[in-house]
Amino acid sequence: MARPVVLFSPWIRLWHWTNVAFMLGLIVSGLSLHFADPKVGVIDFNLAQRVHNIFGIALSVNYIFFVVANITSGNWQHYIPKLRGYPGQAAKQLRYYLWDIFLGRPSPFPTTPEDHFNPLQKVIYLVVMYLLMPILIVSGALYLWPELAPDRLWGVDGLLPVAMAHYTVAYLIVLFMCVHLYLGTCGKTPTAHFKSMITGLHEE
Amino acid sequence: MKNVLVAIVAMMLIGLGGAFSPSLATDDGGGGRVENDPNQKPPLTKADCLSCHTVAGQAAKPPRPNVAERLRDQQINSENFEQSVHADLSCDDCHGDGFTRFPHRGASQETIKTCPECHKGQNRTIVPEFKRSVHARLGPNVFTCYSCHDPHNVRKAASLGGVRNLAHRDNGMCLGCHDSDAQYAKWSPNKRPDLSIVHSWQPNPQIHWTAVRCIDCHTPEKPNGAIAHDILPKAQAERHCVDCHSTDSSLLTRLYRHEIGEERTSEAGFINAYVLTHAYVVGVTRNAYLDWASLILFVVLLSALAGHGLLRFTGYLIRKGRK
Protein backbone atom coordinates (compact mmCIF):
# COMPACT_ATOMS: atom_id res chain seq x y z
CA MET A 1 0.00 0.00 0.00
CA ALA A 2 1.39 3.39 -1.05
CA ARG A 3 2.34 5.88 1.68
CA PRO A 4 0.08 8.90 1.94
CA VAL A 5 1.61 12.13 0.64
CA VAL A 6 0.81 15.69 1.72
CA LEU A 7 -1.32 17.21 -1.01
CA PHE A 8 -3.14 20.18 0.53
CA SER A 9 -1.41 22.62 2.87
CA PRO A 10 -3.37 23.88 5.93
CA TRP A 11 -4.18 27.29 4.41
CA ILE A 12 -5.86 25.82 1.35
CA ARG A 13 -7.92 23.40 3.48
CA LEU A 14 -8.97 26.26 5.76
CA TRP A 15 -9.86 28.41 2.76
CA HIS A 16 -11.74 25.55 1.08
CA TRP A 17 -14.03 24.72 4.00
CA THR A 18 -14.70 28.32 5.01
CA ASN A 19 -15.52 28.96 1.35
CA VAL A 20 -17.97 26.05 1.46
CA ALA A 21 -19.71 27.55 4.52
CA PHE A 22 -19.91 31.03 2.97
CA MET A 23 -21.14 29.64 -0.36
CA LEU A 24 -23.90 27.60 1.29
CA GLY A 25 -25.04 30.66 3.29
CA LEU A 26 -25.00 32.76 0.12
CA ILE A 27 -26.93 30.17 -1.90
CA VAL A 28 -29.72 29.82 0.67
CA SER A 29 -30.00 33.56 1.34
CA GLY A 30 -29.60 34.40 -2.37
CA LEU A 31 -32.45 32.05 -3.33
CA SER A 32 -34.59 33.61 -0.58
CA LEU A 33 -33.95 37.07 -2.01
CA HIS A 34 -34.38 36.11 -5.65
CA PHE A 35 -37.61 34.14 -5.13
CA ALA A 36 -38.85 36.41 -2.34
CA ASP A 37 -42.44 35.65 -1.43
CA PRO A 38 -44.32 36.61 1.74
CA LYS A 39 -45.89 33.13 1.89
CA VAL A 40 -43.05 30.72 1.04
CA GLY A 41 -39.74 32.38 1.91
CA VAL A 42 -36.94 29.98 2.85
CA ILE A 43 -35.50 32.73 5.05
CA ASP A 44 -37.27 36.00 5.86
CA PHE A 45 -36.17 38.72 3.42
CA ASN A 46 -34.84 41.05 6.16
CA LEU A 47 -32.63 38.29 7.57
CA ALA A 48 -31.69 36.98 4.14
CA GLN A 49 -30.35 40.35 2.97
CA ARG A 50 -28.24 40.70 6.13
CA VAL A 51 -26.88 37.16 5.81
CA HIS A 52 -26.18 37.69 2.12
CA ASN A 53 -24.33 40.98 2.73
CA ILE A 54 -22.22 39.61 5.58
CA PHE A 55 -21.41 36.32 3.87
CA GLY A 56 -20.73 38.15 0.61
CA ILE A 57 -18.12 40.34 2.28
CA ALA A 58 -16.69 37.28 4.06
CA LEU A 59 -16.46 35.39 0.76
CA SER A 60 -14.72 38.36 -0.90
CA VAL A 61 -12.14 38.64 1.91
CA ASN A 62 -11.64 34.88 1.71
CA TYR A 63 -11.13 35.16 -2.04
CA ILE A 64 -8.49 37.86 -1.64
CA PHE A 65 -6.77 35.59 0.91
CA PHE A 66 -6.91 32.75 -1.63
CA VAL A 67 -5.37 34.82 -4.42
CA VAL A 68 -2.57 36.18 -2.21
CA ALA A 69 -1.80 32.78 -0.67
CA ASN A 70 -1.95 31.16 -4.10
CA ILE A 71 0.67 33.57 -5.42
CA THR A 72 3.00 33.45 -2.40
CA SER A 73 2.84 29.66 -1.99
CA GLY A 74 3.25 28.84 -5.67
CA ASN A 75 -0.05 26.93 -5.62
CA TRP A 76 -1.12 28.93 -8.68
CA GLN A 77 0.98 26.68 -10.90
CA HIS A 78 -1.52 23.83 -10.50
CA TYR A 79 -4.12 25.91 -12.36
CA ILE A 80 -2.05 26.52 -15.50
CA PRO A 81 -2.87 24.02 -18.27
CA LYS A 82 -0.12 22.67 -20.47
CA LEU A 83 -1.08 24.23 -23.77
CA ARG A 84 1.00 21.93 -25.91
CA GLY A 85 -1.18 18.94 -26.80
CA TYR A 86 -4.02 20.23 -24.64
CA PRO A 87 -6.88 19.04 -26.90
CA GLY A 88 -5.50 15.48 -26.82
CA GLN A 89 -5.10 15.61 -23.02
CA ALA A 90 -8.61 16.95 -22.57
CA ALA A 91 -10.04 14.27 -24.86
CA LYS A 92 -8.22 11.60 -22.88
CA GLN A 93 -9.65 12.92 -19.60
CA LEU A 94 -13.11 13.20 -21.13
CA ARG A 95 -12.93 9.62 -22.33
CA TYR A 96 -12.02 8.60 -18.77
CA TYR A 97 -15.04 10.39 -17.30
CA LEU A 98 -17.43 9.07 -19.96
CA TRP A 99 -16.20 5.50 -20.30
CA ASP A 100 -13.05 4.28 -18.52
CA ILE A 101 -14.31 5.26 -15.08
CA PHE A 102 -17.21 2.80 -15.40
CA LEU A 103 -14.72 0.01 -16.15
CA GLY A 104 -12.61 0.86 -13.11
CA ARG A 105 -9.60 1.93 -15.18
CA PRO A 106 -7.08 4.32 -13.63
CA SER A 107 -7.23 8.09 -14.25
CA PRO A 108 -4.94 9.16 -17.14
CA PHE A 109 -3.74 12.13 -15.04
CA PRO A 110 -3.45 10.90 -11.45
CA THR A 111 -3.23 13.44 -8.64
CA THR A 112 0.32 14.01 -7.39
CA PRO A 113 1.87 16.66 -5.12
CA GLU A 114 3.47 18.16 -8.25
CA ASP A 115 0.26 18.22 -10.29
CA HIS A 116 -3.03 18.41 -8.42
CA PHE A 117 -5.47 18.74 -11.28
CA ASN A 118 -6.21 16.94 -14.54
CA PRO A 119 -6.37 19.01 -17.78
CA LEU A 120 -10.14 19.54 -17.58
CA GLN A 121 -9.98 20.56 -13.91
CA LYS A 122 -7.22 23.07 -14.65
CA VAL A 123 -9.30 24.96 -17.22
CA ILE A 124 -12.56 24.75 -15.27
CA TYR A 125 -10.91 25.87 -12.01
CA LEU A 126 -9.09 28.66 -13.85
CA VAL A 127 -12.37 29.96 -15.29
CA VAL A 128 -14.28 29.60 -12.01
CA MET A 129 -11.63 31.09 -9.72
CA TYR A 130 -10.18 33.80 -11.96
CA LEU A 131 -13.12 34.81 -14.15
CA LEU A 132 -16.45 33.90 -12.53
CA MET A 133 -15.47 34.65 -8.92
CA PRO A 134 -14.24 38.19 -9.73
CA ILE A 135 -17.43 38.90 -11.71
CA LEU A 136 -19.50 37.52 -8.81
CA ILE A 137 -17.66 39.64 -6.24
CA VAL A 138 -17.62 42.86 -8.28
CA SER A 139 -21.31 42.58 -9.22
CA GLY A 140 -22.13 41.75 -5.59
CA ALA A 141 -20.20 44.82 -4.42
CA LEU A 142 -22.15 47.00 -6.87
CA TYR A 143 -25.33 45.52 -5.41
CA LEU A 144 -24.12 46.30 -1.90
CA TRP A 145 -23.12 49.86 -2.84
CA PRO A 146 -25.57 50.63 -5.68
CA GLU A 147 -24.46 54.26 -5.79
CA LEU A 148 -21.32 52.93 -7.54
CA ALA A 149 -23.39 51.22 -10.26
CA PRO A 150 -24.32 53.16 -13.42
CA ASP A 151 -27.58 55.02 -12.92
CA ARG A 152 -29.03 54.03 -16.30
CA LEU A 153 -27.83 51.51 -18.86
CA TRP A 154 -29.52 50.70 -22.19
CA GLY A 155 -32.66 52.56 -21.15
CA VAL A 156 -33.16 50.63 -17.91
CA ASP A 157 -31.97 50.92 -14.32
CA GLY A 158 -28.19 50.40 -14.26
CA LEU A 159 -28.62 47.74 -11.58
CA LEU A 160 -30.41 45.40 -14.01
CA PRO A 161 -27.27 44.31 -15.94
CA VAL A 162 -25.42 44.07 -12.61
CA ALA A 163 -28.18 41.87 -11.18
CA MET A 164 -28.29 39.67 -14.30
CA ALA A 165 -24.52 39.18 -14.22
CA HIS A 166 -24.58 38.41 -10.48
CA TYR A 167 -27.44 35.95 -10.80
CA THR A 168 -26.08 34.16 -13.89
CA VAL A 169 -22.52 33.83 -12.59
CA ALA A 170 -23.75 32.68 -9.17
CA TYR A 171 -25.86 30.06 -10.92
CA LEU A 172 -22.89 28.81 -13.00
CA ILE A 173 -20.83 28.54 -9.81
CA VAL A 174 -23.64 26.53 -8.19
CA LEU A 175 -23.58 24.14 -11.19
CA PHE A 176 -19.80 23.90 -10.80
CA MET A 177 -20.23 23.10 -7.09
CA CYS A 178 -22.67 20.28 -7.90
CA VAL A 179 -20.21 18.70 -10.37
CA HIS A 180 -17.31 19.38 -7.99
CA LEU A 181 -19.18 17.65 -5.16
CA TYR A 182 -19.99 14.65 -7.36
CA LEU A 183 -16.45 14.28 -8.68
CA GLY A 184 -15.35 14.37 -5.04
CA THR A 185 -16.84 10.87 -4.80
CA CYS A 186 -14.72 9.61 -7.70
CA GLY A 187 -11.58 8.94 -5.66
CA LYS A 188 -10.12 5.61 -4.66
CA THR A 189 -13.14 5.29 -2.38
CA PRO A 190 -16.25 7.58 -2.48
CA THR A 191 -15.01 9.46 0.60
CA ALA A 192 -11.25 9.52 -0.16
CA HIS A 193 -11.17 13.01 -1.71
CA PHE A 194 -13.26 14.50 1.10
CA LYS A 195 -10.94 13.01 3.73
CA SER A 196 -8.02 14.31 1.73
CA MET A 197 -9.34 17.89 1.91
CA ILE A 198 -9.71 17.49 5.70
CA THR A 199 -6.36 15.80 6.53
CA GLY A 200 -4.38 17.17 3.59
CA LEU A 201 -3.09 13.65 2.89
CA HIS A 202 -3.55 11.79 -0.37
CA GLU A 203 -3.02 8.08 -0.92
CA GLU A 204 -1.43 7.44 -4.29
CA MET B 1 -54.72 128.55 -32.79
CA LYS B 2 -52.36 126.21 -30.98
CA ASN B 3 -54.50 126.39 -27.85
CA VAL B 4 -57.65 125.52 -29.84
CA LEU B 5 -55.99 122.40 -31.32
CA VAL B 6 -54.89 121.20 -27.87
CA ALA B 7 -58.43 121.66 -26.56
CA ILE B 8 -59.94 119.62 -29.47
CA VAL B 9 -57.44 116.75 -28.99
CA ALA B 10 -58.11 116.75 -25.23
CA MET B 11 -61.89 116.53 -25.77
CA MET B 12 -61.44 113.63 -28.22
CA LEU B 13 -59.27 111.72 -25.74
CA ILE B 14 -61.81 112.25 -22.94
CA GLY B 15 -64.53 110.95 -25.24
CA LEU B 16 -62.53 107.86 -26.19
CA GLY B 17 -61.64 107.23 -22.57
CA GLY B 18 -65.30 107.22 -21.67
CA ALA B 19 -66.11 104.76 -24.44
CA PHE B 20 -63.42 102.22 -23.39
CA SER B 21 -63.50 102.54 -19.60
CA PRO B 22 -64.88 99.45 -17.76
CA SER B 23 -68.60 99.78 -17.30
CA LEU B 24 -69.66 100.15 -13.70
CA ALA B 25 -73.16 98.96 -14.58
CA THR B 26 -73.80 95.25 -13.97
CA ASP B 27 -76.63 92.88 -14.45
CA ASP B 28 -78.75 92.62 -11.32
CA GLY B 29 -79.71 89.06 -12.13
CA GLY B 30 -83.25 90.03 -12.97
CA GLY B 31 -82.49 91.54 -16.33
CA GLY B 32 -82.43 95.09 -15.04
CA ARG B 33 -79.32 97.24 -14.73
CA VAL B 34 -78.13 98.50 -11.37
CA GLU B 35 -75.49 101.07 -10.71
CA ASN B 36 -72.62 99.83 -8.53
CA ASP B 37 -70.90 101.84 -5.87
CA PRO B 38 -68.65 104.13 -7.91
CA ASN B 39 -65.96 103.82 -5.20
CA GLN B 40 -65.78 100.03 -5.51
CA LYS B 41 -62.81 98.81 -7.55
CA PRO B 42 -63.28 96.29 -10.39
CA PRO B 43 -62.60 92.63 -9.46
CA LEU B 44 -58.97 91.57 -9.76
CA THR B 45 -57.98 89.08 -12.39
CA LYS B 46 -55.56 86.21 -11.79
CA ALA B 47 -52.94 88.20 -13.75
CA ASP B 48 -53.40 91.11 -11.34
CA CYS B 49 -52.71 88.85 -8.34
CA LEU B 50 -49.75 87.12 -9.97
CA SER B 51 -48.20 90.47 -10.88
CA CYS B 52 -47.37 90.90 -7.17
CA HIS B 53 -47.40 87.31 -5.88
CA THR B 54 -44.81 85.84 -8.23
CA VAL B 55 -41.12 86.55 -8.53
CA ALA B 56 -41.53 87.15 -12.26
CA GLY B 57 -44.37 89.61 -11.65
CA GLN B 58 -42.33 91.54 -9.12
CA ALA B 59 -39.38 91.67 -11.48
CA ALA B 60 -41.52 93.22 -14.24
CA LYS B 61 -42.47 96.15 -12.02
CA PRO B 62 -40.39 99.08 -10.87
CA PRO B 63 -38.33 98.02 -7.84
CA ARG B 64 -40.22 98.40 -4.55
CA PRO B 65 -37.94 96.86 -1.92
CA ASN B 66 -40.35 97.28 1.00
CA VAL B 67 -43.21 95.60 -0.94
CA ALA B 68 -41.00 92.80 -2.21
CA GLU B 69 -39.83 92.13 1.34
CA ARG B 70 -43.42 92.05 2.69
CA LEU B 71 -44.50 89.62 -0.03
CA ARG B 72 -41.43 87.41 0.24
CA ASP B 73 -43.34 84.59 1.98
CA GLN B 74 -46.44 85.08 -0.15
CA GLN B 75 -45.00 84.30 -3.55
CA ILE B 76 -46.20 81.38 -5.58
CA ASN B 77 -44.46 79.60 -8.41
CA SER B 78 -46.63 80.49 -11.41
CA GLU B 79 -45.15 77.67 -13.49
CA ASN B 80 -46.13 75.09 -10.87
CA PHE B 81 -49.53 76.74 -10.46
CA GLU B 82 -50.28 76.54 -14.19
CA GLN B 83 -49.64 72.77 -14.04
CA SER B 84 -51.66 72.36 -10.86
CA VAL B 85 -55.11 70.77 -10.74
CA HIS B 86 -56.26 74.19 -9.46
CA ALA B 87 -54.88 76.07 -12.49
CA ASP B 88 -58.34 76.67 -13.94
CA LEU B 89 -59.61 78.34 -10.77
CA SER B 90 -59.38 82.06 -10.35
CA CYS B 91 -57.65 83.37 -7.23
CA ASP B 92 -60.87 84.61 -5.65
CA ASP B 93 -62.45 81.14 -5.98
CA CYS B 94 -60.43 80.26 -2.89
CA HIS B 95 -59.22 83.59 -1.54
CA GLY B 96 -62.69 85.14 -1.47
CA ASP B 97 -63.34 88.84 -1.30
CA GLY B 98 -61.47 91.53 0.50
CA PHE B 99 -58.27 91.42 -1.47
CA THR B 100 -58.92 94.51 -3.57
CA ARG B 101 -57.31 96.91 -1.09
CA PHE B 102 -53.56 97.32 -0.92
CA PRO B 103 -52.08 96.31 1.34
CA HIS B 104 -54.70 93.61 1.98
CA ARG B 105 -56.41 93.83 5.34
CA GLY B 106 -55.55 91.18 7.91
CA ALA B 107 -59.21 90.18 8.07
CA SER B 108 -59.03 89.17 4.40
CA GLN B 109 -57.26 86.00 5.49
CA GLU B 110 -60.47 84.85 7.16
CA THR B 111 -62.27 84.71 3.81
CA ILE B 112 -59.92 82.05 2.43
CA LYS B 113 -61.83 78.86 1.75
CA THR B 114 -60.80 75.65 3.46
CA CYS B 115 -60.19 72.50 1.42
CA PRO B 116 -63.32 70.62 2.63
CA GLU B 117 -65.56 73.34 1.19
CA CYS B 118 -64.81 71.91 -2.26
CA HIS B 119 -63.42 68.44 -1.37
CA LYS B 120 -66.40 67.28 0.66
CA GLY B 121 -66.34 63.62 -0.40
CA GLN B 122 -62.62 63.17 0.11
CA ASN B 123 -62.87 64.97 3.43
CA ARG B 124 -65.28 62.35 4.78
CA THR B 125 -62.57 59.71 4.25
CA ILE B 126 -59.58 61.83 5.13
CA VAL B 127 -60.74 63.26 8.49
CA PRO B 128 -61.11 59.93 10.35
CA GLU B 129 -57.83 58.76 8.82
CA PHE B 130 -56.04 61.92 9.82
CA LYS B 131 -57.33 61.64 13.40
CA ARG B 132 -55.33 58.40 13.67
CA SER B 133 -52.25 60.02 12.13
CA VAL B 134 -49.10 60.75 14.08
CA HIS B 135 -49.55 64.39 13.00
CA ALA B 136 -52.92 64.61 14.78
CA ARG B 137 -51.04 64.28 18.09
CA LEU B 138 -49.92 67.89 17.63
CA GLY B 139 -53.42 68.94 18.71
CA PRO B 140 -56.63 70.04 17.02
CA ASN B 141 -56.31 72.48 14.12
CA VAL B 142 -52.53 72.69 14.47
CA PHE B 143 -51.72 70.50 11.51
CA THR B 144 -53.83 71.35 8.46
CA CYS B 145 -54.03 70.26 4.83
CA TYR B 146 -51.70 73.15 3.98
CA SER B 147 -49.02 71.79 6.32
CA CYS B 148 -48.24 69.20 3.65
CA HIS B 149 -50.19 70.16 0.53
CA ASP B 150 -49.48 73.42 -1.28
CA PRO B 151 -52.79 74.24 -3.01
CA HIS B 152 -50.85 76.20 -5.65
CA ASN B 153 -48.83 73.12 -6.55
CA VAL B 154 -51.17 70.13 -6.47
CA ARG B 155 -50.57 67.80 -9.39
CA LYS B 156 -52.00 64.42 -10.22
CA ALA B 157 -49.48 61.63 -9.69
CA ALA B 158 -49.93 60.41 -13.26
CA SER B 159 -48.91 63.81 -14.65
CA LEU B 160 -45.51 63.92 -12.96
CA GLY B 161 -43.70 61.91 -15.63
CA GLY B 162 -42.64 58.87 -13.66
CA VAL B 163 -42.25 57.20 -10.33
CA ARG B 164 -39.00 58.94 -9.39
CA ASN B 165 -40.58 62.36 -9.89
CA LEU B 166 -43.56 61.22 -7.83
CA ALA B 167 -41.26 60.01 -5.04
CA HIS B 168 -39.29 63.27 -5.19
CA ARG B 169 -42.48 65.37 -4.99
CA ASP B 170 -44.13 63.39 -2.20
CA ASN B 171 -40.97 62.87 -0.14
CA GLY B 172 -40.33 66.60 -0.40
CA MET B 173 -43.50 67.17 1.66
CA CYS B 174 -42.13 64.99 4.46
CA LEU B 175 -38.48 66.02 4.25
CA GLY B 176 -39.40 69.71 4.30
CA CYS B 177 -39.89 69.32 8.07
CA HIS B 178 -38.31 65.97 8.91
CA ASP B 179 -34.99 66.87 7.28
CA SER B 180 -34.84 70.45 8.59
CA ASP B 181 -34.17 71.34 12.23
CA ALA B 182 -35.63 74.81 11.76
CA GLN B 183 -38.92 73.59 10.23
CA TYR B 184 -39.22 70.66 12.63
CA ALA B 185 -38.84 73.03 15.60
CA LYS B 186 -41.95 74.90 14.44
CA TRP B 187 -44.01 71.81 15.19
CA SER B 188 -42.28 69.98 17.98
CA PRO B 189 -40.18 70.93 21.01
CA ASN B 190 -38.38 67.58 20.72
CA LYS B 191 -35.06 67.11 19.00
CA ARG B 192 -35.51 66.11 15.36
CA PRO B 193 -34.63 62.42 14.91
CA ASP B 194 -31.82 61.90 12.40
CA LEU B 195 -33.51 60.14 9.46
CA SER B 196 -30.35 58.24 8.50
CA ILE B 197 -30.09 56.78 12.01
CA VAL B 198 -33.82 56.01 12.31
CA HIS B 199 -33.68 54.19 8.96
CA SER B 200 -30.31 52.51 9.49
CA TRP B 201 -32.04 49.10 9.66
CA GLN B 202 -32.89 49.56 5.97
CA PRO B 203 -30.24 48.73 3.36
CA ASN B 204 -29.19 51.80 1.37
CA PRO B 205 -31.83 54.20 2.80
CA GLN B 206 -30.73 57.01 0.47
CA ILE B 207 -31.40 54.81 -2.57
CA HIS B 208 -34.79 53.83 -1.16
CA TRP B 209 -35.73 57.47 -0.62
CA THR B 210 -35.16 58.33 -4.27
CA ALA B 211 -37.06 55.27 -5.50
CA VAL B 212 -40.04 54.99 -3.14
CA ARG B 213 -42.09 57.35 -1.06
CA CYS B 214 -42.02 57.74 2.72
CA ILE B 215 -45.78 57.16 2.68
CA ASP B 216 -45.37 53.79 0.95
CA CYS B 217 -44.15 52.45 4.29
CA HIS B 218 -45.60 55.05 6.66
CA THR B 219 -49.29 54.61 5.74
CA PRO B 220 -51.50 51.53 6.06
CA GLU B 221 -52.41 49.82 2.81
CA LYS B 222 -55.90 50.61 1.48
CA PRO B 223 -57.79 48.12 -0.70
CA ASN B 224 -58.27 50.66 -3.52
CA GLY B 225 -54.59 51.60 -3.60
CA ALA B 226 -55.20 55.21 -2.55
CA ILE B 227 -52.86 56.70 0.00
CA ALA B 228 -54.29 56.90 3.51
CA HIS B 229 -53.85 60.05 5.59
CA ASP B 230 -53.03 58.25 8.83
CA ILE B 231 -49.30 58.66 8.79
CA LEU B 232 -47.82 55.88 10.88
CA PRO B 233 -45.07 56.41 13.47
CA LYS B 234 -41.91 54.36 13.07
CA ALA B 235 -43.10 51.59 15.40
CA GLN B 236 -46.08 50.89 13.14
CA ALA B 237 -44.49 51.61 9.77
CA GLU B 238 -43.86 48.80 7.27
CA ARG B 239 -40.68 46.87 8.04
CA HIS B 240 -41.31 43.65 6.15
CA CYS B 241 -39.09 44.06 3.11
CA VAL B 242 -40.81 41.18 1.33
CA ASP B 243 -44.11 43.10 1.16
CA CYS B 244 -42.46 45.27 -1.47
CA HIS B 245 -39.72 42.88 -2.62
CA SER B 246 -41.82 40.15 -4.23
CA THR B 247 -43.55 39.64 -7.56
CA ASP B 248 -46.87 40.63 -5.93
CA SER B 249 -45.26 43.69 -4.40
CA SER B 250 -47.53 46.13 -2.57
CA LEU B 251 -45.72 48.85 -4.54
CA LEU B 252 -47.58 47.73 -7.66
CA THR B 253 -50.91 48.91 -6.24
CA ARG B 254 -49.43 52.00 -4.56
CA LEU B 255 -46.37 53.71 -6.01
CA TYR B 256 -46.69 52.04 -9.42
CA ARG B 257 -50.50 52.09 -9.69
CA HIS B 258 -50.30 54.67 -12.52
CA GLU B 259 -47.65 52.72 -14.41
CA ILE B 260 -49.12 49.23 -14.52
CA GLY B 261 -48.83 47.71 -17.99
CA GLU B 262 -51.30 45.35 -19.54
CA GLU B 263 -48.87 42.42 -19.69
CA ARG B 264 -47.65 41.12 -16.36
CA THR B 265 -44.67 39.39 -18.02
CA SER B 266 -42.90 41.12 -20.90
CA GLU B 267 -41.92 39.44 -24.18
CA ALA B 268 -38.38 39.20 -22.83
CA GLY B 269 -39.70 37.33 -19.80
CA PHE B 270 -39.34 40.01 -17.15
CA ILE B 271 -42.09 39.93 -14.52
CA ASN B 272 -43.50 43.41 -13.77
CA ALA B 273 -41.37 44.73 -16.64
CA TYR B 274 -42.89 48.24 -16.40
CA VAL B 275 -41.12 48.61 -13.05
CA LEU B 276 -37.80 47.98 -14.79
CA THR B 277 -37.98 51.21 -16.76
CA HIS B 278 -37.82 53.03 -13.41
CA ALA B 279 -35.87 50.72 -11.11
CA TYR B 280 -34.49 47.23 -10.73
CA VAL B 281 -36.15 45.91 -7.59
CA VAL B 282 -34.89 42.65 -6.06
CA GLY B 283 -37.67 40.07 -5.98
CA VAL B 284 -40.05 42.14 -8.14
CA THR B 285 -38.51 42.20 -11.59
CA ARG B 286 -36.92 38.78 -12.03
CA ASN B 287 -36.94 37.05 -15.40
CA ALA B 288 -39.34 34.10 -15.58
CA TYR B 289 -37.71 32.54 -18.67
CA LEU B 290 -34.27 32.65 -17.09
CA ASP B 291 -35.66 31.10 -13.89
CA TRP B 292 -37.25 28.24 -15.83
CA ALA B 293 -34.14 27.68 -17.97
CA SER B 294 -32.03 27.62 -14.80
CA LEU B 295 -34.31 25.10 -13.15
CA ILE B 296 -34.43 22.82 -16.21
CA LEU B 297 -30.63 22.93 -16.66
CA PHE B 298 -30.18 22.20 -12.95
CA VAL B 299 -32.49 19.18 -13.10
CA VAL B 300 -30.75 17.91 -16.28
CA LEU B 301 -27.35 18.27 -14.62
CA LEU B 302 -28.44 16.48 -11.44
CA SER B 303 -30.00 13.71 -13.54
CA ALA B 304 -26.79 13.34 -15.55
CA LEU B 305 -24.71 13.14 -12.37
CA ALA B 306 -27.13 10.64 -10.83
CA GLY B 307 -27.00 8.53 -14.04
CA HIS B 308 -23.20 8.70 -14.06
CA GLY B 309 -23.11 7.62 -10.42
CA LEU B 310 -25.49 4.76 -11.12
CA LEU B 311 -23.32 3.48 -14.01
CA ARG B 312 -20.22 3.75 -11.83
CA PHE B 313 -21.92 1.75 -9.10
CA THR B 314 -23.17 -0.84 -11.61
CA GLY B 315 -19.66 -1.21 -13.02
CA TYR B 316 -18.32 -1.61 -9.50
CA LEU B 317 -20.87 -4.37 -8.73
CA ILE B 318 -20.05 -6.22 -11.96
CA ARG B 319 -16.31 -6.06 -11.26
CA LYS B 320 -16.92 -7.19 -7.69
CA GLY B 321 -19.07 -10.11 -8.94
CA ARG B 322 -16.30 -11.23 -11.32
CA LYS B 323 -13.81 -11.41 -8.47
Image: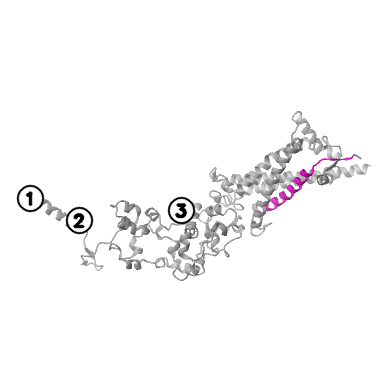
Q: Position of residue B42 (x, y in %)?
A: 25, 61
**B174, A88: nearer the viewer:** B174
For residue A97, side relative to residue B224 (left or right)? right
| Marks 1 and 2 share the same chain | yes
What separation in Å lies between label 1 and label 2 (alpha carbons)? 26 Å
Q: Earlier in the sequence, mark 3 or mark 2?
A: 2
Q: Residue furthest right?
A: B323
**Local secondary structure at mark 2:** helix
Residue density around tag 3, few if under 14, some if 14–19, many if 20 or more, within 10 Å: some
Residue beneath disc 2: B20
Q: Amino acid at mark 3?
A: Leu
For residue B147, side relative to residue A56 (left or right)? left
Which subunit holds the residue at mark 1? B
| Residue B295, above or below B102 | above
Q: Residue furthest left?
A: B1
**Local secondary structure at mark 3:** loop
Which subunit holds the residue at mark 3? B
Residue beneath disc 3: B160
What separation in Å lies between label 3 and label 1 (alpha carbons)? 65 Å
For residue B302, side relative to residue B164 (left or right)? right
Which subunit holds the residue at mark 2? B
What separation in Å lies between label 3 and label 2 (alpha carbons)? 44 Å
